Image (spheres, rainbow, N blue to C red):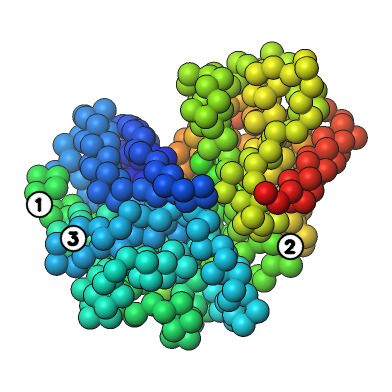
Amino acid sequence: MAVLAIDAGTTGVTCLVIDDALRTRGRAYAEFTQHYPRPGWVEHDAEEILATSLHVARAAAKDADVPLRSLAALGITNQRETAVLWDRASGQPVHRAIVWQDRRTAAACHAMTADWEDTVRRRTGLLLDPYFSASKLQWMLDNVPGLRDRARQGGLAFGTVDAWLLWRLTGGRVHATDVTNASRTLLWDIHAGAWDAELLEAFGIPEAVLPDVRPSAHDHGPTDASVFGAEVPVAGLVGDQQGALFGQRCFEAGQAKNTYGTGCFLLQHTGGEAVASRNGLVTTRAASTDGGARFALEGSIFVAGAAVQWVRDGLGLIKAAPEIDGLASQVEDSEGVVLVPAFTGLGAPYWDPHARGALLGITRGTDRRHIARATLDAIAFQSADLVTAMQEDSGTRIEELRVDGGATRSAPLMQIQADVLQRPVVRPAEVDTTAYGSAMLAGLATGVWGMGDFREPGGEKVFRPRIKAEAAEARMRTWHHAVEAVRAYRP
């Protein structure tokens, strides 16, 4: 008996096959195309995400030597906030998906701030920022001729990537999302557990386009038999970061994890209490296994692993992402070089959509080794800012940082993180915990496992600080000076 997890991330899709003993039996990954039609705009082809997901699912099943038709359940986890809009009759997208990183609606969000910021914060737990889904959907309805009328008439369906995949995998029979993804739209009241009529009107969103909202562990119905050769229950939907929180066994208030992927996302479970942030974090729903509401505090960094991709694809300094470790390890530090990777603005705790990236402190002696080291430093520095903000909001010191995501395979990065935080960083044996968490939820909903089966897996690697606190503080001061410089710059 096995469960398949599809993790449709920002730059690619990972699939895992998990057996009934909670062991990873098979794994596969493939990237898909990133589209940048204008500066600050980021789009995906939703059809390509679907095709890549199916290709990778078949590859993972082959790696596990498990027939897809024999699967007990399917879990889906996804890049959140990315907006997909499609035609209900044909099932075809009516525009490219607008990605969470996209900043085209910054001015529109700013124009709403005075009238709506407090209401948005109070009801959704979020900030009025283009990061979230509502203004992206609004932009499509306003800028593609005919879409608004079709939406009002019920001819279009909106969803984040989980809802899009669910619709297509079930042959258009199910239009649904889960509480974690709904809580990232700016349209869903996280306290009432319902779409908010006033916010829908404010953004000009017809309710007819919206999906049903269900628990994260829930049997949504079977895939169409043509997809995997048999009907397979789709029983887990969860936003990637809440999936990682669940996969890290953070089930109780106070437990926290940081995921290093395209971006970085620090979440701390707050149980049944929705804790309001005073330090640039957001309040969001955690994964639900029943009808009860669970919450988390979250800090989001827009560019983490994506900075390494930029060093690879934009600068051409490396041919493959893992090469950055070897380069960065050739120097003891960056010699004053600082990368602020605000390629799509700055996320928490700054929330500056107008900031742009910069490489500072360059001298004649700077070479690609220092840039590589500065890139890893930037990921760690941004995460340290999140830890500080979260501790201040929650009033709880994070004694150790649980980490996951593809970038945690970088031992130099994890060591830098432990150094600047001055506390242990704990990496699990299975770092793809976003996918793993969605598999756990799917298996839970279909009776493959019970909560008592989710023991701590063991096999983790612990990174401990190797520098003194004074040195760590000096590095963070330099980072903060660089951030101030970037925020002061306006082209």
Question: Could you tell which of marks 1 and 3 lies nearer the N-terminus?
Answer: 3
Residue 166: x, y in percent?
26, 58
Of the two numbered discs 3 and 2 in the rendering, the one whose residue sits closer to the viewer? 3
User: In the image, what residue type sits under mark 1?
Assistant: Ala
| Residue behind mark 1 | 225
Q: Nearer the viewer, residue 392 or 451?
A: 392
Q: CA distance from mark 1 to mark 3?
A: 17 Å
In percent of width and height, residue 4 lies at 28, 44
Residue 439 showing in the rendered view: no
- Local crowd size for mark 3, using a 10 Å CA cut-off: few (<14), some (14–19), many (≥20): some
Q: Residue at x 46, y 43 (%)?
A: 433
Determine which residue is flagged by label 3. Answer: 91
| Residue 401 as seen in the image, left or right of residue 216 | right
Q: Disc 1 or disc 3, which is closer to the eye?
A: 3
Q: Indicate the quadrant where residue 334 lies.
A: top right
Which residue type carries mark 3?
Gly
Q: Earlier in the sequence, mark 3 or mark 2?
A: 3
- Image position of 88 (left or right of 200): left
* Pointer 2 residue: 279
Quick one: 87 or 54, which is closer to the camera?
87
| Above or below, comparing residue 431 to residue 280 in the picture | above
Position of residue 276 in the picture relative to residue 125 (left or right) = right
* Badge 1: residue crowd in 10 Å (few <14, some 14–19, many ≥20): some
